[in-house]
Each structure stands twice: as C-alpha cells, then as structure tokens.
Image: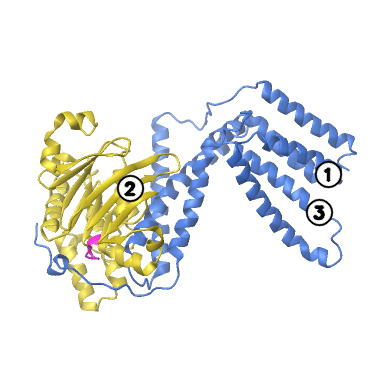
Amino acid sequence: MERVPAWLAARESYEPRPDRGRHLEKSLLALLHVLAALREAPGAGKDGARLNPALKLVSTFLVILLVSLSRGGLFLEAAAAFELGWLCLLRGETIARVLRRVLAAGLFALAILLPAYALGRGANLPFVCGKVLLALLAAAIFSSATGWPSMAAAFSTLRVPDVFVMTLDMTVKYISLLGALLLDMLCALKLRSVGRDERKMSSLAGLAGTLFLKSKDAAWAQYQAMECRCFDGRYAVSRRAGLGWRDAAFVAADLAIVAFFVAAGWGR
Amino acid sequence: MIELRDVSFAYPETDALRRIDLRIEEGDSVAIIGPNGSGKSTLLRLICGLATSVSGSYRFDGEAMTAARLSDPRFAKAFHRRVGFLFQDSDAQLFCGSVYDEIAFGPRQMGLCEADFDGRVADLVGLFGLRAVESRVPYHLSGGEKRKVALASVLALNPEVLCLDEPMGGLDPRTKSSLRALIATLNAAGKTIICATHDFEYVEGLFRRAVALSREGRLVRDGPYDEIMGDRDFLEAMNII
C-alpha cells in the first residue's frame, strides 16, 4: 500500500462556509415521519376487539357511503355514535393519533368552506363539515386498526384480484425498505455536506437516481426469487381470519346503522 | 478525544444501547465487536452525530454533543468534517454521477482552491487504485470498488476520526487484504479508527483495543484487542465467534 499523501496525515483547521437552506434536515425529518408511520402499521392491528379485517373494510366502505348519501343531521349523529364506539375499541395512543389526524383534516375542510359562509351560503357548513369529519374518521380508524398484512388478507377474502393484492403488498414492503435506504443516503449526504453545496439539486437528483436503480434491481431480484419458488401469477394470502362473536356484534352494529339510515327516511 | 458517559439509546421498538461508558483517545484503533443486534452500528452513529443519546453524555474534544448543539449547522458541519463515517451498505453512500464527482463532493464544498481540490481527488484516486474507473457511475462498480470509492469520498474531507461499519462485509479476500492495509496505513498516519466488525480473520493486528457489546447493548468488556480475541470462552459465550 502506498504512503498516504501529506495533507491526509496533517491535522486540518476548517471553518465551514455558511450555506442557506435546511433542505436536508427537513427531508430527513419528513422521511423519518413517513417511515415511523409505515413501521407502525404492521403492529397497528391490535385494536381491542380484534375484528375480522374484511369485516372492518366492508364496514368502513358502508359507513362512508351512508354518510355521503345522508341528507339529515339525525343520521350523522347516529353514524358518529357508531364510529365513536368503534374508536373506543382502539388503544389510547391510537385514539389520540386518529383524532389528531381527523381534526386537522376537518379544520382544513372548514377553512376551504369558510368563503361560502362569508358569501351568505353557509347554512350547510356544519352539515358538510360533519360529513367530512365522519368519512375521514371511518377511514382513519380502519387504517390505524388494520396492519398491512391484514389489509392484504381482507382484500383477498373479498376476492379482489390477486395482482392488485400483490401490488399493494409489495409496494408497502418496498416503500419501507427503500425509505430506509433513502434515509441512509440522506444521512450520508448530510455527513459529507460540510460546507456550501453549490449543486443542491444535482445532489438530490443523484439520490433519486440511485434509489431508482436500487428499486429496479430489487424488483428484478424479487421477481427472480419468486420464479425460483414456482410463482405462477397467483398470490396466496395465508391469513384468512374466521368470524367470532365480536365480529357478530360488529355486524349487528352495521345492520343497526343501515336500518337507522332507512328508518330515518334514507338518511334525512 | 471521544468520551461517552452512561450513554443509552433506544429505538421506538427496543433499547439499543444501555449505559455505555467509553473513552477513545486520538490515534487509537478500536474494534467494536458483538453479536448481531448488539448496537455496534448504533454506537458508531452516536459517535458521528447521526443520533443523539436519550440519556448520558457524549463529549468530542471536550465539547458536549447534544441535539441542540448538532442542530447548529455551522457546528455540525465542522464536526462532520472531523468525524467520517463509512456505511455498511456502500450504495447508501454513493450518489454522484461519477467516481471523480463522488470523491470531489466534499472538497468542492470546503471551498478549496482548484489546485488543492484536484490534488486531493487525484491523490485518493491513486491511493485506492481507482484510476481505471474514475469516470464510471459508482452504482455500477463491483462491491469492492464501491467500498473503496465510499472510503475515498469520506477521506477527501480529511477527517480525524474514521467510523467504519463492517468495512469488510461482502468483499473478496484480496479486496479485504488491501482494505486492511489501507486502514492500518491511515491509523499509522494519525487517524483514529473505530470499526464495527465481524470479520476477525482479516482485521488481525489492525486494532490495539476491542470493545465488546452484549446482545442487550451493554458494554461487557473493554481492553487490548489480542487479549479479548484470545479469550475464546468469552467470545463463544457472547456469541461473537
């Protein structure tokens, strides 16, 4: 091995040049949040009642549909009671997270609708906001209470085409894997960004390019591994949960909400 | 130079490091050993400022390395220049369009004059034997070449401390030998080497000191490398060999 050059053996005094922009820190923070949310999802299926995921999926669609069709406040109150009951089955920190997310989205909807109120057409403002909140709440409860594997199982139970389930499953898996790689790449970029980066966009483009190449290679390797294990286009999801008494109670609640919708004059 | 006192670190799911006390002097060469999941990489990340401890204190050259201190861009940049980190996965470290640009990335930011800047890159290309691949895209190089480019790009900043995360992983025997010789040369030139490793065959004689971490992330032994590596009962009990 050659001797190291003199500058590499000498101690260097260095004062970083000031650089504007904190894009790296912001990107790292945003990515960390996304990854944390994705990692949380698989364990999130621990809702208190451990309901059948397919049933949860159907209920979510049903509630969103009925809330969208409803034309009266009474049904919305009933739907809110149903959703709050469902929400109570989740763990405390999950409830807090769901409510934070839903309230933020609800406030956004309110902000968008406020001009209508200012123009004197705000009679329906509470009603529309209520609908938005309830639809978002149903979706947020489902996503928080159902891990990705359970979602795939739910789609499979409902006879959603295999290719769709497989694509969903792989996408989620690779978002997490490639996200972790991107996090490392951003850390590496941060560690070597010791002064003023005159080519910020070029650095970020480099990260995107490497990520693309890596994802292409990973997808190809996965396809070959699947072929080696006799993959024939059918994607079997092994976890098809059965129905228990909790599910029966949940179905009863679903039927009650449908009955109320009809009894209230189709949601009036 | 590096002083960790009662340092603990936890990920959301698990505790990674528990109450670590460690002091590393300038010019030292330390191997961090332990089974998978013992927190070796986490310890390196703490040392190079990519993570901050949940309790305890970390001082670098007498300066407390807190989250608040590291959020000051000027301080963080000066610190990152002094402490280099070689990632386990070289792909995570290479993001430029050519080997030349990859090595030049750091010096370009440092505002060196053209002659110094070119000289640095040329020296490292020569030192690592990368002349033939200088204009190639790093992603398409072999594993050994990628590792060399990654190390060269870190060395271009002339760090005083080199944190190496499994530098021999996935390399062929010849590349391991040449990397070993290079690390020894860098240490002889005054660089402090801190290296997480499993590949004991190729690092023999490279380190003066070893720090052993247990599966639970505790520092269970700290002493001369040869002495610890000679204690086979201990290494087997700790699932290190």
Residue B24 on image: x %, y % = 20, 53
For label 2, the crowd category at 10 Å Cα-Cα, with few meaning under 14, some 14 to 19 and many 20 or more, is many
Residue B177 on image: x %, y % = 13, 47
For label 3, the crowd category at 10 Å Cα-Cα, with few meaning under 14, some 14 to 19 and many 20 or more, is few
The hue in which chain B appears in the rendered picture of the protein: yellow
Q: Chain of mark 2?
A: B
Front disc: 2 or 1: 2
Q: CA distance from mark 2 to mark 1?
A: 57 Å
Identify the disc placed on residue A70: 1
Q: Chain of mark 3?
A: A
Amino acid at circle 2: Val
Q: Earlier in the sequence, mark 3 or mark 1?
A: 1
Task: Report the span colored magenta.
Answer: B153-159
The verdict on residue B154 being magenta is yes
Mark 2 sits on what residue?
A: B7
* Chain letter corresponding to the colour blue: A
> Would residue B125 be seen by someone viewing this image from the given angle?
yes
Residue at x-position 63% and y-position 50%: A101
